[in-house]
Structures are given as structure tokens and as C-alpha cells.
């Protein structure tokens, strides 16, 4: 059974804290994504990684950075958390190659910044 | 650039009734289209996808969608709703030359007993 796991389901942090969200996939996928999900806005792409140490900005990268030191692990970093980063964060992975391939999603991390 | 519009943020139907969730897309190239479903407290999972060929696509759990190029639509249907269909549904279109997707705003489906 293929799996994408995220380190926390719920997280509460304070404004200004540095926050790490971790994602691990066991499918040997080359490509991984971080999205944020907000009501009425759907999913918006934050960052995309197409290989170890390779990354590409998505549509809303401001306030975020990422790290991919190993193929199976993709981390999202909030350098200084702000209240407007309160959201649901979803990680996904996909086998490189065809654009028709399915993205596999983790269960999400609901982050609250106070 | 690609974009997706889902008509109706909330849809409510009775158990056993037809489910129709609307999706319109904009794409400057032949699109590839997806429907994903998100059950409560879970990530998204693929329902079905349109690539090329047959315009009526069948997916899991009895859902299907029809690609209509002339209407730039990819509406999702199910003949008879079940309580377990209650979820949020996302339509997505592929971005040109990449595996990245553009997602719609989502439609929350409620099933009334």
C-alpha cells in the first residue's frame, strides 16, 4: 500500500516561531509537492521538488522555504510563522514522467499560528 | 495559463439522487483533467482522469465524468448518491509541460438521508 505520511496532523505554534513540516513517501517518487488548502481557495502550490536538492517555487512561495536532502523526504519550513499562515498543509508525491500520473497525498497537517 | 472553476462551493442531495458537480476549465493546450476527492480528515485521492481518447471517463465508487471540449467542461456525476459520498471534491487541470496541477476551489457534497 503506497503511502505519503506527514509528521503531524495538528500543530499549534506562536507568531515568529520557526516551523518544520515533514513529509515522507515510500514510493520512490522523484517529484514532491507542498500545497496549502484554504476554504474557498482550493489547493495552492507552495513549492515543488523534482529531485534531491532541487526545488522550484510554486504560486505562493512567500514566507516559506523547503528542503529535500533525501529522495523520500520533503520538508516545508516557515522561517517566522505568521497568523496568515494558519492553514491546512498537504504534501504530495508523483512518479516522474507522464503528466497523467496520479499525485498521492498525505493526510495533511492543520497548522494554527497564534 | 490554465484555470479551473467549480460551480457551487456546496452541493446537497438526497441519498439515492443524482450527483452532479460542475467543473469548467481554461487551457490554451489540450487539457488533461482530474477529479480528486477528500474525505473528512484525509488527504486527496484520485477519482478519475481524462487524458485522451474516450470522452466519458469512469472512476472509482461509481463516479464518471464527461469531457466536453466545446463547453470546456468536465462535470462529475453519479447516478445514485450514497451516504459515504459525503466529501469535498476537487477538479484539476494539468499545467502545460509539467506534472503540476491547477486545482479548483472545491465543492463540498452533503448527502441527506
Image (cartoon, coloured by chain):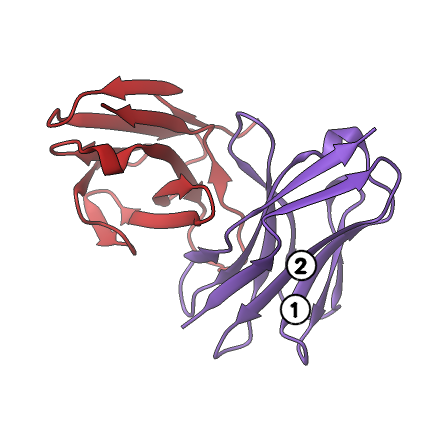
Q: In the rendered view, does A110 fall on the left or right side of B25? A: left
Q: Residue B58, image x and y in percent?
A: 76, 53
Q: Which chain is purple?
A: B
Figure quadrant of the N terminus of chain B: bottom left
On screen, residue B42 above or below A50: above
10 Å crowding of disc 2: few (<14), some (14-19), many (20+): some
Q: CA distance from mark 1 to mark 2?
A: 8 Å
Residue on which the image places disc 2: B22
| Residue at point 19%, 43% (across, down) | A53
Q: Residue A108, image x and y in percent?
A: 42, 29
| Residue at point 84%, 48% (across, down) | B18
**Colour applied to chain A:** red
Residue in the foreground of this view, choosing between A18 and A4? A18
Q: In the rendered view, does B63 fall on the left or right side of B93? A: right
* Same chain check for tags 1 and 2: yes
Q: Quadrant of residue A37?
A: top left
On screen, residue B28 above or below B18: below
Label 1 resides on the chain identified as: B
Regarding residue A70, the answer to whether it shows in the image is no
Checking the image for residue B73, the label placed there is: 1
| Residue at point 45%, 69% (across, down) | B2
Label 2 residue SS: strand
- The answer to whether the residues at label 1 and label 2 have Cβ atoms under 8 Å apart is yes
Residue in the foreground of this view, choosing between B113 and A25? B113
Q: Residue A32, image x and y in percent?
A: 36, 43
| Residue at point 56%, 68% (across, down) | B25
Amino acid at each position: 500500500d503506497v503511502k505519503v505520511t506527514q509528521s503531524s496532523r495538528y500543530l499549534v505554534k506562536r507568531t515568529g516561531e520557526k516551523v518544520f513540516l515533514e513529509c515522507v513517501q515510500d514510493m520512490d517518487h522523484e517529484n514532491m509537492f507542498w500545497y496549502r488548502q484554504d476554504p474557498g481557495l482550493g489547493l495552492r502550490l507552495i513549492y515543488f521538488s523534482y529531485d534531491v536538492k532541487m526545488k522550484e517555487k510554486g504560486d505562493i512561495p512567500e514566507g516559506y522555504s523547503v528542503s529535500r536532502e533525501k529522495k523520500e523526504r520533503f520538508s516545508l519550513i516557515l522561517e517566522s510563522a505568521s497568523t496568515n499562515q494558519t492553514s491546512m498543509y498537504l504534501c504530495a508525491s508523483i512518479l516522474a514522467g507522464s503528466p497523467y500520473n496520479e499525485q498521492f497525498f498525505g493526510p495533511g497537517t492543520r497548522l494554527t499560528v497564534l | 495559463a490554465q484555470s479551473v472553476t467549480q460551480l457551487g462551493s456546496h452541493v446537497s442531495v438526497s441519498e439515492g439522487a443524482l450527483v452532479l458537480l460542475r467543473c469548467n476549465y481554461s487551457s490554451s493546450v489540450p487539457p488533461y483533467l482530474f477529479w480528486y476527492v477528500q474525505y473528512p480528515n484525509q488527504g486527496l485521492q484520485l477519482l478519475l482522469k481524462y487524458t485522451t481518447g474516450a470522452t466519458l471517463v469512469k472512476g472509482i465508487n461509481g463516479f464518471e465524468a464527461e469531457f466536453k471540449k466545446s463547453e470546456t467542461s468536465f462535470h462529475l456525476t453519479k447516478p445514485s448518491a450514497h451516504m459515504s459520498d459525503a466529501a469535498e471534491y476537487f477538479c484539476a487541470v494539468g499545467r502545460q509541460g509539467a506534472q503540476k496541477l491547477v486545482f479548483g476551489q472545491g465543492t463540498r457534497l452533503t448527502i441527506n438521508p
